[in-house]
Structure formats: structure tokens, C-alpha cells
Image (cartoon, rainbow, N blue to C red):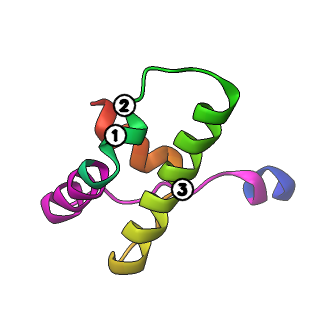
Amino acid sequence: MEEKELHQATRAGNLTAAERLLIVDLVQKYWAVIENKKSDAVTVKEKARMWQLITAEFNAVSATNRSTQQVKQVMCK
């Protein structure tokens, strides 16, 4: 039973309006790379690197740390 409890992810709190605006601003900064329509290996790696960079910049100024997946989900909604 204890092993299951250790592997459960804890839910992060909801994003504030300021955090959402920060993510939007960061995405706009790297928009050209993120919205590139190519799907070759180099472009996919570059897009992943940009999302990691956006997440790092977000986490540097935000009170809560978010994963790259959580940051991407904000832009998909």
C-alpha cells in the first residue's frame, strides 16, 4: 500500500491569471519556432527545446514550478 502512495503524483494548484499571461507572453516570444509546420526530426527537437526553455523561464519567475506538459496544456485550451 505504501508503494502506491509514493508513486502518486500530487496535483498542482490552478494557474493564476498572471501565470497564464506570463505563459502567453513567453510563447509569443518563441512563436516562430513553436508554430513551425515542419515535422522533421530537427524541427521537433527544436520545438521541444523551446518548450523546455519556456518552462524554465516560467519557473524562474513563478511561485510554483510547472512541468513542460503543464505549460503546454495552457496553450492548448
Of tags 3 and 2, the one toward the viewer is 2
Q: Amino acid at mark 3?
A: Gln
Q: Residue at x 58, y 33 (%)?
A: 43
Q: Note whether 54 is above or below 63 in the view shown.
A: above
Q: Who is closer to the viewer here, 37 or 70?
A: 37
Residue 60 falls in which quadrant of the image? bottom left
Q: Residue at x 52, y 40 (%)?
A: 47
Q: Position of residue 52 (x, y in %)?
A: 54, 56
Q: Amino acid at mark 1?
A: Ala
For label 1, the crowd category at 10 Å Cα-Cα, with few meaning under 14, some 14 to 19 and many 20 or more, is few
Q: Position of residue 46 (x, y in %)?
A: 57, 43
**Residue identified by numbered label 3:** 52
Q: Note whether 35 is above or below 6 in the view shown.
A: above
Q: Are marks 2 and 1 in contact (CB under 8 Å)?
A: yes
Residue 35 falls in which quadrant of the image? top left
**Residue identified by numbered label 1:** 32
Q: Residue at x 22, y 62 (%)?
A: 22
Distance (Cα) linking label 3 and label 2? 15 Å
Is 39 contained in the magenta span? no
- Mark 3 or mark 2: name the one nearer the start of the chain: 2
Q: Note whether 8 is above or below 35 in the view shown.
A: below
Segment colored magenta: 6-27
**Residue identified by numbered label 2:** 35
Q: Say which element carries label 2.
A: loop
Q: Say which element carries label 1.
A: helix
Q: Are marks 3 and 1 in contact (CB under 8 Å)?
A: no
For label 2, the crowd category at 10 Å Cα-Cα, with few meaning under 14, some 14 to 19 and many 20 or more, is few
For label 3, the crowd category at 10 Å Cα-Cα, with few meaning under 14, some 14 to 19 and many 20 or more, is some
Q: Amino acid at mark 2?
A: Glu
Image side of residue 38 versus residue 21, left or right: right
Of tags 3 and 1, the one toward the viewer is 1
